[in-house]
Image (tube, helix red, strand yellow):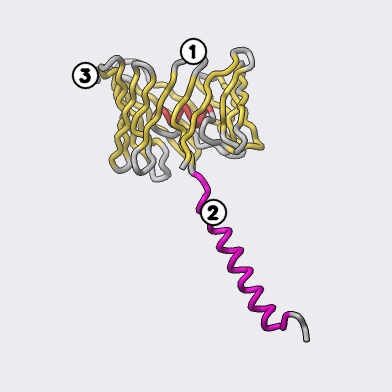
């Protein structure tokens, strides 16, 4: 008589599969989600970030400068305070892809001085931005894309080129992504990690689990290091 009958083998196989699935689910449930909560500069200046229950950025504090972020439907308002006084207010209207379609910036407490930028997209790639002012002529910028990365921008006939680490996806701490995140809106939704442009190459240090730990520029050293909170 076999040590384990065919019926028992099937039962044992089912039990082993169930145990394996339970273990996978348990391991998945234990995965941590992390948020970028602070940036530290070598000078000692720190930028602290706070979020609401939905995971949206609501407060950025950096020395005497404070940004608050309020959300209503497809719009977000970013109010910047300097030593307690309003220095500017940015009103953003996002499109259905969550990218900024229109950005109006009002300077000072009365907003008499302002700029307004309208962004045109093909899918989720911005192709042109037109900025108008109260008195100055409009400013137009066109954008060049390749492999779903923004590789150039053209203004007044001059082209600035950008590079990427094409073997790495963009993430928190990415210079281009982070600069937009702190601004309160997104225009350039790229695929890969931003490497820099002519005259500035960014080098990233990573934590053991793959998060960006710091950004460096060869001629300047560390620009900022990142702090995360995981749960």
Query: On the image, which quarter does residue 68 sit in?
Result: top left
Q: Nearer the viewer, residue 128 or 91?
A: 91
Q: Residue at x 31, y 16 (%)?
A: 82
Callout 3 touching callout 2 (CB < 8 Å): no
Separation (CA) of disc 1 from disc 2: 39 Å
Q: Residue furthest left?
A: 110
Q: Residue furthest right?
A: 1
Examine the rendered structure and indicate whether residue 95 appears above or below residue 84.
Answer: below
Q: Residue at x 52, y 21 (%)?
A: 224
Numbered mark located on residue 28 in the image: 2
Q: Is residue 30 magenta?
A: yes
Q: Residue furthest bottom?
A: 1
The first of marks 3 and 2 along the sequence is 2
Numbered mark located on residue 110 in the image: 3
Separation (CA) of disc 3 from disc 2: 51 Å
Q: Nearer the viewer, residue 159 or 98?
A: 98
Callout in the foreground (3, 2): 2
Examine the rendered structure and indicate whether residue 54 appears above or below residue 79.
Answer: below
Find the magenta span and give its range: 4-32
Numbered mark located on residue 43 in the image: 1
Q: Main secondary structure of the magenta part?
A: helix
Q: Residue 229, percent across and down?
A: 46, 36
- Other-residue count near label 3 (Cα within 10 Å), few / some / many at <14 / 14–19 / ≥20: few
Q: Residue 85, percent across and down?
A: 25, 17
Q: Is residue 5 magenta?
A: yes
Separation (CA) of disc 1 from disc 3: 34 Å
């Amino acid at each position: 008589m076999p040590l384990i009958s065919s019926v028992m083998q099937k039962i044992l196989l089912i039990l082993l599969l169930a145990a394996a699935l339970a273990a996978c689910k348990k391991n998945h449930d234990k995965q941590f989600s992390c948020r970028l909560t602070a940036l530290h500069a070598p000078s000692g200046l720190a930028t602290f970030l706070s979020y609401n229950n939905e995971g949206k950025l609501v407060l950025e504090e950096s020395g005497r400068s404070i940004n608050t972020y309020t959300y209503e439907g497809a719009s977000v308002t970013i109010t910047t305070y300097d030593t307690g006084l309003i220095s500017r207010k940015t009103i953003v209207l996002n499109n259905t892809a969550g990218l900024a379609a229109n950005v109006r910036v009002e300077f000072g407490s009365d907003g008499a001085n302002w700029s307004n930028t309208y962004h045109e997209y093909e899918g989720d790639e911005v192709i042109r931005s037109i900025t108008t002012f109260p008195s100055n002529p409009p400013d137009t910028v066109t954008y060049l894309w390749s492999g779903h990365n923004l590789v150039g921008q053209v203004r007044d006939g001059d082209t600035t080129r950008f590079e990427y680490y094409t073997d790495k996806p963009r993430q928190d701490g990415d210079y281009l992504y982070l600069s937009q995140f702190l601004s309160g809106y997104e225009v350039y939704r790229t695929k890969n990690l931003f490497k820099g442009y002519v005259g500035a190459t960014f080098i990233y240090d990573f934590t053991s689990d793959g998060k960006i730990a710091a950004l460096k520029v060869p001629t300047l050293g560390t620009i900022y290091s990142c702090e995360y909170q995981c749960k």
